[in-house]
Amino acid sequence: MAQGGEVNDVALGRAGTVIKPIALPTTVPVRHDPINYTVGDGEDLRSIAAKFNITEDEIRWSNPFIGTSTRVKKGDPLLIPPIAGVVVQVRQGDTVASLAAAWHVDTASIMDFNYLRDPLAELVEGKLLVLPAGHGTVLSPLPPAANLPAAVGSRSIFDIRVGGAAGPYPVTHFPFGQCTWYVATKVPIPWIGNAWQWYGAAQQAGWATGATPRPGSILVDWESRYYGHVAYVEGVNADGSFLITEMNYVGWGVIDQRTVHPGQVPLIGFIYPPR
């Protein structure tokens, strides 16, 4: 032992010091940066998701231009998260803490995976980050057309138009990118909480509520099974359908508008702000 040697599986150096064996990696190291992928001929979201062992929603959240469409075109550039999660592009004012709140992720996991240090430091605008296990509003699978109300006919509730502007009111008590933040820019909201809590909070605040849409009212529903969803009612049509604008239905931070027919969403109710 004084001169070195081996005892069973333990290697000893001079004076009996234990030499730790070198462990050779047997698996490929986990990639930490987004994967740039170009859609090939005949590929769709399902096949691409299967190729990278992620979900279709994780591709949608990472590429907001896709929206709720089931199709991508040959040549489309996609950002693919290297693990289950979402790829986000940093916007001005974003911090690890704000992204963690928006995408329901632990701050430590974002910092560890992206080699960051300060959860409150403002991030570099335009930087791409991978948020492990990040998730937004559930967008797929889409409901089959047979389950839509007869009044809808061949129209789809997922025919949406991306684009629009936030309202005039400053918001500090809801995280940017969420549906709650957007509606709070359209209507001054005195309470806090997730979207599904808004209906009860409005009643406690003395605001009128009901089951009928009105221009300027707030739609509250369960389109997000975990957090609920809110949207702003821009107008009501003669057939009972109504036009809404919203954020984080297509993707985080994305504003869109769509027409909703009665019975198409899991309704909680409508909030009628005081005038």
Image (tube, helix red, strand yellow):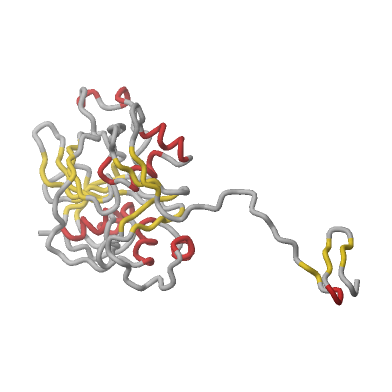
* Residue at the extreme bottom: 15
* Residue at the extreme front: 3
Q: Nearer the viewer, residue 47 or 247?
A: 47
* Residue at the extreme right: 1
Instruction: Tell me the residue at 15%/39% (across/down).
Output: 242
The vertical placement of 99 against 221, above or below, is: below
Tally of numbered tags: 0
* Left-right relation of 144 to 83: left
Image x and y of residue 6, in percent:
87, 63
Instruction: Tell me the residue at 45%/42% (across/down).
Output: 54
Q: Which corner quadrant holds the C terminus?
A: bottom left
Which quadrant holds residue 116?
Answer: bottom left
Image x and y of residue 101, in percent:
37, 61
* Left-right relation of 70 to 261: right
Instruction: Tell me the residue at 89%/62% (across/down).
Output: 7
Which quadrant holds residue 102?
Answer: bottom left
The vertical placement of 7 against 35, above or below, is: below
Q: Nearer the viewer, residue 224 or 221?
A: 224
Image x and y of residue 190, in percent:
23, 66
Q: Which corner quadrant holds the N terminus?
A: bottom right
* Left-right relation of 164 to 99: left
Image x and y of residue 183, in percent:
21, 56
